Image (spheres, grey):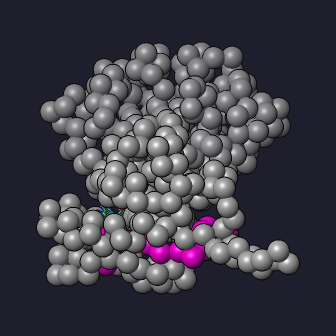
């Protein structure tokens, strides 16, 4: 099959969807790979490395997609670019389908199959293909590291000749993939770490990382997980109890990292302005959910806000892109693990439409929008 790797670098996006390592794997397997000039530059993968791996370098995205059977990308590229693709080809990316239904419509019009990597079912077999996990993990790590660089004090306890420095108190809200890595990173740095989530299964995970779990553990909490392993929307009563408990706790924290999301809904507000104002000057809040409305009142997307009281609220966007080397390498391996489901026995592009992973992530097929979650939108 002919594979094209787009140059996705634009604005805050620094990642690339194939690494020299995965390109070599594709070439060794008999595929022809074209990489668009400069695609890996921001991840420190020079064009020469892709060339050494056996790829051809193309000058522009538009030229490179024309003959491709499969286009690999981070975010899917533009609707115009999809229009330049060959009918019957496929394109992969994190497509945020419900936020951007016009994109799927453009793919259907062009006769292109769009694979939304963010819709890959979260089943055991698909774990190695799950870009949401690989990227969230790095975001959780980076959130703690950035908080540490803004915080004017140390994380670990230090006993020095000049006296003892107390360890930083760190609180992680939302213990999914990003939150678990944030806990592990804060612990590695020596912070006294606590965490909360509405899913009971996370209590044990928090404990196994050496952190303390803090939550309102009532009857509603015991049922607060969907069959898919995600959080449920909690009742107003539960949220009020949760707010009361966390308010007291947050006032004593130096660093708070929030990662709480509910699929298909705005992020829950967990830290109110009053809670922010209760924190000591110099404390840092990092809101990883800012792209979906934010968990922290006063967080601004793409900005670091410092309150009158000297509390910093970090609202950076696209955290994985801040570590483009590792995030690109893992994204690339996720795609490499998905590729066999799109490859025929003779090595041609031949998606396995009977496979639930392909069914779960394909938005379009044969000129139509086919995904259940999009029908009617496009
Ligand atoms: P996510 O990004 O959707 O949400 C982050 C966390 O926020 C979740 O743990 C959620 O419970 C929590 N949250 C929501 N509302 C909250 C509130 N009001 N207060 C506190 N916390 C709140 O989650 P995710 O990282 O995508 O992971 C979700 C689940 O999916 C986890 O159980 C994870 O282990 C599982 N998962 C499975 C696979 C797989 O099997 N392929 C892959 C990745 C994740």
Which is more toward the observer, 82 or 341? 82
User: Which quarter of the figure has residue 56?
Assistant: top right
The reply to whether the magenta stretch includes residue 198 is yes
Q: Residue furthest right?
A: 161
Magenta segment range? 184-200
Left or right for 34, reference 371 = right
Viewport quadrant of the C terminus: top left
168 relative to 214 in the view: left or right: right
x, y percent for residue 175: 42, 68
Q: Position of residue 46 (x, y in %)?
A: 79, 33
Q: Is residue 316 above or below residue 333?
A: above
Image side of residue 263 versus residue 167, left or right = left
> Looking at the image, which is closer to me, 62 or 356?
62
Query: Residue 192 at x, y = what percent?
Result: 57, 76
Quarter of the rendering containing residue 49: top right
Is residue 211 visible to us here? yes
């Amino acid at each position: 099959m002919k594979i094209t790797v787009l140059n996705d670098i634009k604005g805050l996006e620094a990642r690339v969807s194939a690494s020299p390592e995965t390109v070599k794997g594709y070439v060794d397997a008999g595929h022809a790979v074209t990489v668009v000039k400069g695609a890996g530059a921001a991840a420190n993968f020079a064009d020469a490395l892709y060339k050494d791996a056996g790829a051809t370098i193309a000058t522009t995205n538009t030229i490179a997609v024309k003959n491709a059977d499969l286009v690999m990308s981070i975010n899917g590229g533009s609707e115009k670019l999809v229009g330049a693709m060959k009918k019957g080809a496929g394109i992969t990316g994190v497509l945020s389908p419900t936020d951007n239904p016009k994109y799927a419509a453009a793919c259907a019009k062009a006769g292109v199959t769009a694979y939304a990597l963010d819709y890959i079912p979260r089943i055991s077999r698909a774990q190695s293909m799950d870009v949401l996990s690989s990227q969230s993990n790095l975001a959780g790590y980076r959130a703690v590291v950035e908080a540490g660089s803004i915080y004017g004090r140390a994380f670990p306890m230090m006993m020095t000749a000049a006296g003892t420095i107390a360890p930083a108190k760190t609180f992680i809200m939302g213990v999914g993939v990003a939150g678990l890595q944030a806990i592990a990173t804060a612990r590695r740095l020596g912070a006294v770490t606590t965490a909360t989530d509405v899913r009971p299964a996370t209590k044990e995970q928090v404990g196994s990382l050496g952190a303390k779990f803090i939550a309102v553990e009532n009857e509603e909490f015991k049922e607060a997980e969907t069959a898919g392993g995600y959080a449920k929307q909690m009742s107003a009563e539960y949220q009020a109890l949760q707010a009361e408990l966390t308010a007291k706790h947050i006032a004593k924290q130096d660093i708070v990292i929030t990662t709480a999301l509910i699929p298909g809904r705005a992020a829950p507000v967990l830290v109110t302005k009053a809670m922010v104002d209760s924190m000591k000057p110099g404390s840092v809040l990092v809101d990883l959910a800012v792209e979906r409305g934010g968990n922290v009142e006063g967080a601004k997307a793409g900005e670091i806000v410092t309150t009158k009281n000297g509390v910093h609220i970090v609202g950076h966007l696209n955290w994985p892109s801040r570590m483009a080397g590792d995030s690109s390498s893992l994204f690339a391996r996720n795609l490499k693990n998905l590729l066999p489901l799109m490859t025929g026995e003779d090595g041609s592009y031949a998606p396995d439409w009977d496979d639930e992973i392909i069914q779960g992530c394909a938005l379009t097929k044969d000129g139509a929008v086919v995904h259940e979650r999009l029908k009617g939108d496009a």
